[in-house]
């Protein structure tokens, strides 16, 4: 996955969208930068997980579409973290840290409850990410809770492509807003673990993310 190429291609598309919209529509079109914190978890019955905090940063455009509706396009980089319970041979259970890095593209429809001050957004989010990497290799041979042979290092190969449904609310002013958003992954992000000869051959799990962020528009 070449993040630099995706970054520059998306910036070009966002800039093109903004300039084209400004030429063809008398409404507002804003280009913004955004950043915030994430609370990420995998909803699964196959692992004992712990929600953990990460971060997200990126770019966004908001443009008037029709009546009280806006369209929002965006690109964001994220570093999500999660804990998975496991233990050493003679130790007690503890949460083992993993990190997931990637990018997300979103297209959201926004309904303005109060123009420029309060809106509700919903739409799809497409994500590309790397493996779920162990934060510390000293845990790689820990046995995960609920299993006899599945080690912490065995579950790092997750789905690299995900689609989520996002919904949230944004409030503030025309050029600065605060946003709270929830994203639920529609795909089984643990599917690549199946067929690897592990103790469990039917892993299932969906991403669950709460995103709190600030957006500065220009």
Image (tube, rainbow, N blue to C red):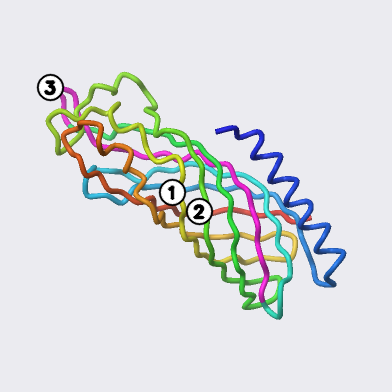
Q: Residues within 10 Å of mark 2 (few under 14, many from 20)?
A: many
Local secondary structure at mark 3: loop
Say which residue label 3 marks. 90
How far apart are the two marked residues, 1 and 3, measured between alpha carbons?
A: 31 Å
* Start-end of magenta stretch: 69-92
Q: What percent of the width, then of the height, locates residue 195?
A: 25, 36
In this rendering, the count of numbered labels is 3
Of pointers 2 and 3, the one earlier in the residue sequence = 3
72 inside magenta stretch? yes
Quarter where residue 5 is shown: top right
Of pointers 1 and 3, the one earlier in the residue sequence = 1
Of pointers 1 and 2, the one earlier in the residue sequence = 1
Q: What percent of the width, then of the height, locates residue 105?
A: 58, 50
How far apart are the two marked residues, 2 and 3, measured between alpha carbons?
A: 38 Å
Say which residue label 2 marks. 211
Quarter where residue 138 is shown: top left
Say which residue label 1 marks. 39
Please state, as top left, top right, bottom left or bottom right, where the C terminus lies in the image: bottom right
How far apart are the two marked residues, 1 and 2, measured between alpha carbons?
A: 7 Å
Is there CB contact under 8 Å for labels 1 and 2?
yes
Answer left or right for 23 relative to 183.
Answer: right
Residue 7 against residue 43 in the figure, above or below: above
Quarter where residue 85 is shown: top left
């Amino acid at each position: 996955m070449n993040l630099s190429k995706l970054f520059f291609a998306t910036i070009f598309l966002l800039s093109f969208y903004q300039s084209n919209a400004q030429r063809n529509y008398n409404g507002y079109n804003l280009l913004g930068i955004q950043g915030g914190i994430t609370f990420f978890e995998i909803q699964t019955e196959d692992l004992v997980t712990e929600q953990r905090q990460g971060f997200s940063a990126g770019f966004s455009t908001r443009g008037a579409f029709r009546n009280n509706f806006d369209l929002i396009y965006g690109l964001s980089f994220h570093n999500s973290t999660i804990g998975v319970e496991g233990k050493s041979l003679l130790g007690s259970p503890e949460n083992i840290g993993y990190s997931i890095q990637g990018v997300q593209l979103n297209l959201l429809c926004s309904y303005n409850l109060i123009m420029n001050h309060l809106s509700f957004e919903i739409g799809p989010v497409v994500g590309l990410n790397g493996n779920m990497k162990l934060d510390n290799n000293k845990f790689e041979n820990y046995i995960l809770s609920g299993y006899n042979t599945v080690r912490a290092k065995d579950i790092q190969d997750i789905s690299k492509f995900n689609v989520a449904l996002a919904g949230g609310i944004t409030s503030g002013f025309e050029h600065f807003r605060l946003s709270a958003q929830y994203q639920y992954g529609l795909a089984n992000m643990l599917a690549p673990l199946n067929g690897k000869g592990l103790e469990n051959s039917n892993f299932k799990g969906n991403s669950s993310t709460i995103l709190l962020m600030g957006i500065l528009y220009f």
